[in-house]
Image (cartoon, grey):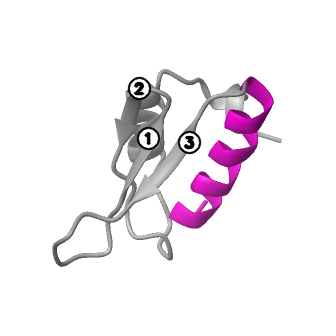
């Protein structure tokens, strides 16, 4: 799963749960951004690159979600 896929799935989960989802790119160099899911946030990797299983789990933990919450 790429960073863009992760954000796309988060959007679906947020819509289903009526939670605000925002994506922002900090005003500095780099390809990382910050995703806000309600009051929680995480920083996904480059949206074009693959996310490893460890980082994927860490980002879900940051947002208070489980794998089943964003899988099809």
Our reading of the magenta stretch's main secondary structure is helix
Reply above or below: 37 against 53: above
Residue pointed to by mark 2:
39
Q: Are marks 2 and 1 in contact (CB under 8 Å)?
A: yes
In the image: residue 62, left or right of residue 47: left
Horizontal and vertical percent position of residue 61: 42, 26
**Quadrant containing the N terminus in the rendered view:** bottom right
Q: Secondary structure at mark 1?
A: strand
Residue pointed to by mark 1:
36
Horizontal and vertical percent position of residue 12: 75, 43
**Quadrant containing the C terminus in the rendered view:** top right
Q: Are marks 1 and 3 in contact (CB under 8 Å)?
A: yes
Numbered tag placed on residue 21 in the rendering: 3
CA gap between label 2 and label 3 equals: 9 Å
The front one of 43 and 50 is 43
* Mark 2 crowd level (few <14, some 14–19, many ≥20, 10 Å Cα): few
Q: Are marks 2 and 3 in contact (CB under 8 Å)?
A: no
Horizontal and vertical percent position of residue 44: 39, 55
Give, as a single range, the part of the protein colored magenta.
Answer: 1-17
Which sits earlier in the primary sequence, circle 2 or circle 3? 3
Which sits earlier in the primary sequence, circle 1 or circle 3? 3
Seen at 33% across and 65% down, the residue is: 25
Seen at 35% across and 61% down, the residue is: 33
CA gap between label 2 and label 1 equals: 7 Å
The front one of 35 and 46 is 35
Q: Secondary structure at mark 3?
A: strand
């Amino acid at each position: 799963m790429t960073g863009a896929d992760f954000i796309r799935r988060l959007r679906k989960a947020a819509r289903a749960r009526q939670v605000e989802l925002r994506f922002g790119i900090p005003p500095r160099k780099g390809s990382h951004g910050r995703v806000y899911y309600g009051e929680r946030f995480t920083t996904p990797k480059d949206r074009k690159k693959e996310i490893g299983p460890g980082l994927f789990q860490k980002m879900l933990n940051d947002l208070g979600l489980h794998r089943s919450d964003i899988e099809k």
